[in-house]
Image (tube, grey):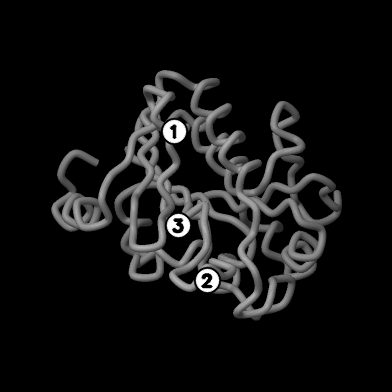
Amino acid sequence: MAAFVLGNGISRRPIDIDLLKTRGDVYACNAVYRTHTVTALVATDRGIANEIQASGYPANNRFYTRRPDPHTGAQRVPQEYFGFSSGPIALAIACADGHDRIYLLGFDLGPDEQGRFNNLFAGSEHYKTVGSGATYTGNWIKQIMRIAKDHPSHEIVRVHGSTTAEIKDFEQVPNLQKLDFADFVARINSQKDL
């Protein structure tokens, strides 16, 4: 069964998370919990992690953070990736769960079309405002490469949408591939080669 790891870049806006859940396990980050329950949720930034724990979400759902409140049901992120960011940790957890093919959606790793902050939750609590400057992504790139190298038997497919940055360094990692957004949608709709 395939797995889908959701970053919060705007390229994934057209994706129906409920449809993904019928095709495989869904791993996500941060404010996704506000609208969807997923297989596993990760939040490493303290503000959003505290919001999630206070909401009661971890009592009935898998949730990982660096400093879990033991009374909420939250779990500690895997030790070997403790200092990593939420999206890469979600990828690591999907690998640990044994998925052979993992699709990365919304891992844009760059600015929006206007060169600004690229996040579906921009302007909401614990996020930069709409129109803020783009976030540095070099750490995420290194972390994704490390996880892919740590799990060479897993096929990791980064789905490229209109705001997905080309990352040349990813070409050095044999099990880290890219797929055009339209081709991904065709696979999902037909369940072909998932």
Q: Name the foreground residue: 130 vs 158.
A: 130
Amino acid carrying mark 2 in the image: Leu
Amino acid carrying mark 1 in the image: Phe
Disc 1 marks which residue?
170
Disc 2 marks which residue?
120
| Residue 121, image quadrant | bottom right
Q: Are marks 3 and 2 in contact (CB under 8 Å)?
A: yes
The residue drawn where x is 74% and y is 48% is: 65
Q: Is residue 55 left or right of residue 179?
A: right
How many numbered callouts?
3
Q: Name the foreground residue: 77 vs 104.
A: 104
Secondary structure type for disc 2: loop
The residue drawn where x is 80% and y is 65% is: 47
Q: Nearer the viewer, mark 1 or mark 3?
A: 1
Disc 3 marks which residue?
106
Q: Residues within 10 Å of mark 3 (few under 14, many from 20)?
A: many
Q: Gap in Å between the C-alphas at discs 3 and 2?
A: 9 Å
Image quarter (top left, top right, bottom left or bottom right) of the N terminus? top left
Q: Are marks 1 and 2 in contact (CB under 8 Å)?
A: no
Q: Name the foreground residue: 64 vs 118.
A: 118
User: Which numbered disc flags the more N-terminal residue, 1 or 2?
Assistant: 2
User: Which numbered disc flags the more N-terminal residue, 1 or 3?
Assistant: 3
User: Which numbered disc flags the more N-terminal residue, 3 or 2?
Assistant: 3
Q: Position of residue 188 (x, y in %)?
A: 23, 54
Q: Are marks 1 and 3 in contact (CB under 8 Å)?
A: no
Q: Position of residue 41 (x, y in %)?
A: 60, 53
The residue drawn where x is 56% and y is 39% is: 141
Q: Position of residue 112 (x, y in %)?
A: 48, 67
